Amino acid sequence: MAATIEVRNLSHTYSVGTPFQHDAVKHLSFTVERGEFLGIIGHTGSGKSTLIQHLNGLLKPTEGDVLLDGESIWKDKLTTRAARFRVGLVFQYPEYQLFEDTVFQDIAFGPKNMGLKEAEIRQRVLRAADFAGVDRSVLDKSPFDLSGGQKRRVAIAGVIAMEPEVIVFDEPTAGLDPAGCASLLENIRAYRQATGATILMVSHSMDDVARLADRLLVLNKGQVEMMGKPSEIFTRAQRLREIGLNVPQVTTLFLRLKELGAPVDPATYTVEDALEQLLRLKGGGRRA
Amino acid sequence: MLKDITLGQYFPGDTVVHRLDPRTKLLLVIVYIVALFLCKWYVSYAVALAFLALAVALSRIRLKALFKGLKPLIIIIIFTALLNLFYSEGRVLVEFWIFKITYEGIQNAFFLVLRIMLLVMGTFLLTYTTSPIALTDGLESLLSPLKKIRFPVHELAMMMSIALRFIPTLIEETDKIISAQKARGADFETGNIFRRAKALIPILVPLFVSAFRRADELATAMECRCYHGGKGRTKLKQLHYRGRDVIALLLGALLLAAVIVLRQFAL
Ligand SMILES: Nc1ncnc2c1ncn2[C@@H]1O[C@H](COP(=O)(O)OP(=O)(O)OP(=O)(O)O)[C@@H](O)[C@H]1O
Ligand SMILES: [Mg+2]
């Protein structure tokens, strides 16, 4: 259960023909492989949210195309509608879209729109709740009685319940406390491991995407600035800073160590990696 | 997108018309509307048109923007024109079945359409060249004599400016909620009227919840800054009449006088 996404020469212009006309993304081309975890980073207003709304056909490209498993999602109406369910989209602050009487019904909204049977819906809701970390005891409560973090998990479960082949998260951890962030990211990781779904995640936190993503897509002013493995991207710290981004804290430290002449790998971005290298350095020091 | 609605939109600029005192502009629009209703014949309409043309030229607002404002009214305009065309007594030009078109009918229809168009374009020019904040300030100042009879002028103005301030925010929010529910497969386009009305629930509930939340937050924020009504409240931007306002008001008086005089001669 996974799909490849291909974005071909995608451009989107808002408010065409008014004084407020604005190119949000320009000539984007890239491919996301089956089962891959792609991190999307870029400064505020770089077009991240605009880009991801094209992946399930919410926005129509002004130019270019989006292909799912090699087939354009704009081929005909049915294909476009199918894309809605094949590519799940979790918006920024998704907790503001809750509306049903109970948490259960809210999570069931997507599957119901897919026209599934009652029993199947029930199964999916329970499964999605588990994946998203929604406690089964709250399923009968009103979503409006939950805390902000719980609401967000309910909203995420609402998308997971459609069991899409691709899930796109727009800043899923924005506004959560560190513990909430960590456990939500762990939920996402576990979901991916269990289902093999393709995952795209927009994030402002380099540390988060660095740890989870197989590859990173860096956007700058609506264009692809870089795309590649985190270790490749983070060696270009200088350029990242120029376009208003940062590198993970560990990488900053290791770049500095390298500058000072220590024999370390400057493209280190996880704490575990860093620890291993530091221990090796220390061990080497003793031997000398 | 919902965002592209232009109703009552402000186009920032730095022309004479933009810099006029909002009270002057409000008064001028009232004078202009009264004048329009006093117009009788081609000559007086031409005078009113000239007045509007002068204001438009000075404001550098593009004609396209003004005509765009007329778009939502096309149906009303056509409807009133047709009514007048077919239901006026007078010299008959064409007659078929139960319809007859008279010479007077054509003329009435023409004047009515002209009147509506001039009226709408004039008021749009006001909202195009005056920021909503300036507009409510002007209104508050113009209505302030009513405070004597305990009419809540300040509260009304405050409500208006808050409403105006939040319209774009709520529109943006509605767009977002629609997208989010569409992403969960919500379908707003197909089905009969009942299904479609029901499909609005996933939009309206979150929208109301968020509007109430915003209202609550705003009330708290206002109280934190010691807001307690209009009494003794001073303004950051004081309104002052200047030379250009006097000239503009004189022009307005001239327009009214001209139309009244022309009316005497049925021109
Ligand atoms: N509905 C819209 N109408 C007009 N312009 C828009 C709209 N949505 C976004 N834009 C503009 O398009 C550009 C890209 O916006 P987008 O929301 O994609 O950025 P982003 O990378 O998601 O930013 P952030 O990190 O703040 O979420 C911005 O300049 C924004 O002002
Ligand atoms: Mg965004």
Image: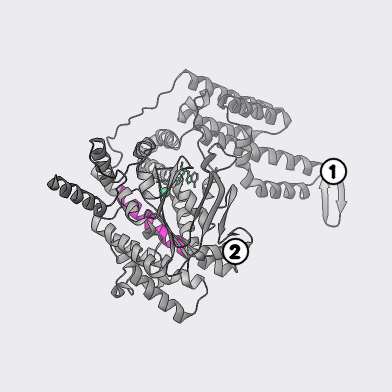
The image position of residue A277, as x and y in percent, is 23, 49
Q: Nearer the viewer, mark 2 or mark 1?
A: 2
Residue at (69%, 41%) from the top-left corner? B113
Q: Chain of mark 1?
A: B
Q: Which residues are magenta?
A: B202-218
- The residue beneath circle 2 is A79
Label 2 sits on a secondary structure element that is helix
**Mark 2: amino acid:** Thr
Residue at (14%, 47%) from the top-left corner? A287
The image position of residue A272, as x and y in percent, is 24, 55
Q: Nearer the viewer, residue A274 or B250?
A: A274
Pointers 2 and 1 within a single chain: no
The quarter of the image holding the C terminus of chain A is top left
- Asked if one can make out residue A102 in the rendered structure from this viewpoint, the answer is no
Q: Quadrant of residue B115?
A: top right
Residue at (33%, 42%) from the top-left corner? A246
Q: Nearer the viewer, residue B27 or B207?
A: B207
Q: Which mark is residue B91?
A: 1
Q: Chain of mark 2?
A: A
Rendered position, B148 above or below A139: above
